[in-house]
Image (cartoon, rainbow, N blue to C red):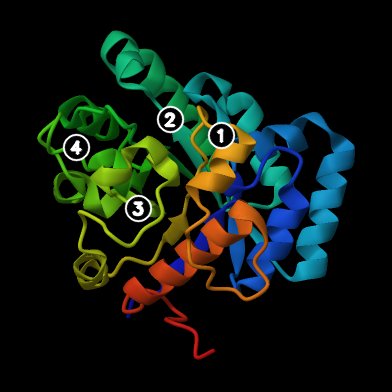
Amino acid sequence: MSAARLSLSTVAFRAGELVPALEWAARLGLPGVEVGSHHAEELQRSPEAAREATTAFQRLGLRPLSVHAWTEVEGLGEVCPFTAELGAGLIVVHCPHEAIVTGLEAQVAALRRWDGWCRERGITLTVENASRQPLAPFVELFQAVPALAMTLDIKHAYKPETLGLTHADYLRELGDRVANLHLCGIDRSREELGDGCPPGRDAVDWAQLAADLAARGYAGLATVELAYPEHLSGGEIERAYAGLRPVAPDAEGASQRLSAWGVEFFREKLAGLLTDGPRAD
């Protein structure tokens, strides 16, 4: 039986808004969150912010399920100890295509070292596919680090027009390595919203994906990751999401509306994969 857990990345909330993000995740009935890269860096730099976050996690009965690194592989010496101290069970880090093809041995050496370090402490180190990530070199990286796990970003993988790839190709080659999914909308008519695109009119059949993953016995995280486009101002962001139907009656502002919509959408579409399925309320 599958035992995947639904999670929410805090990246939909701005820097300095981690505690409100945690309070909202608890309101949405989630078991925990992925601490987004900007929030993770804030906690790593500020002991006071880290104490406030730890208190909030305990108060809300919420877990830091994963941490998105604020660095690439070269910074794992900071990221991994921070993650262990926070008590999270999984790390997401990027290993860019350029770093793989020009410095594979160095990337492999660092990943082997920190993967072993994490495993000794019960932490899963994952490398996430980037949005312009050719498949063959990425597979070569994983072949060189046999125990390494993967975060599969579905939107980053869905590049039939430019790379001739979709998430199905990644699952075919690396499906047994996937421990975390990143989920957002994949709507070519709203590409200006990037990774902040609300799901609903998507190129991917999410129910079919859930069935395929359930057949594999997938038991990792399914993380809703909706990040605001960096090129939009605060007012432009509010206008971009103004028509988004609120699924939580008390949702206020774009961050709450967007994250609530994403969580409820994927909770329904991935119901056959998740431990809790759709909520009765």
State the image quarter where residue 54 is shown: bottom right
Closer to the eye: label 1 or 3: 3
- Mark 3, Cα crowd under 10 Å, few <14 / some 14-19 / many 20+, is many
Residue furthest to the top: 102
Q: What residue type is labelled 1?
A: Ala
Q: Are marks 3 and 2 in contact (CB under 8 Å)?
A: no
Residue drawn at the location 20% of the way across and 27% of the way down = 134
Q: From the image, tell me which residue sits under label 2.
A: 94
Q: CB atoms at circles 3 and 4 under 8 Å apart? A: no
Say which of 278 and 246 sits in front: 246
- Callout 4 environment at 10 Å: few (<14), some (14 to 19), or many (20+)? some
- Residue found 37% across the figure and 36% down from its top: 192
Q: Mark 4 points at which residue?
A: 159
- Quadrant assignment, res 42: top right
Marks 1 and 2, how far apart in space?
A: 8 Å
Upstream in sequence: badge 1 or badge 4: 1
Is label 1 in a helix, a strand or a loop? strand
Identify the amino acid type marked 4: Lys
Image spot of residue 166 (x, y percent) = 17, 44
**Which mark's residue is nearer the viewer, 3 or 2?**
3
Q: Which of marks 1 and 3 is nearer the N terminus?
A: 1
Viewer-proximal residue among 96 and 102 = 96
- Label 1 to label 4, Cα distance in Å? 24 Å
Looking at the image, is mark 3 or mark 2 earlier in the sequence? 2
Give me the disc on residue 69. 1
Query: Looking at the rendering, in which quadrant would you find the C terminus?
Result: bottom right
Q: Name the residue under label 3.
A: 185
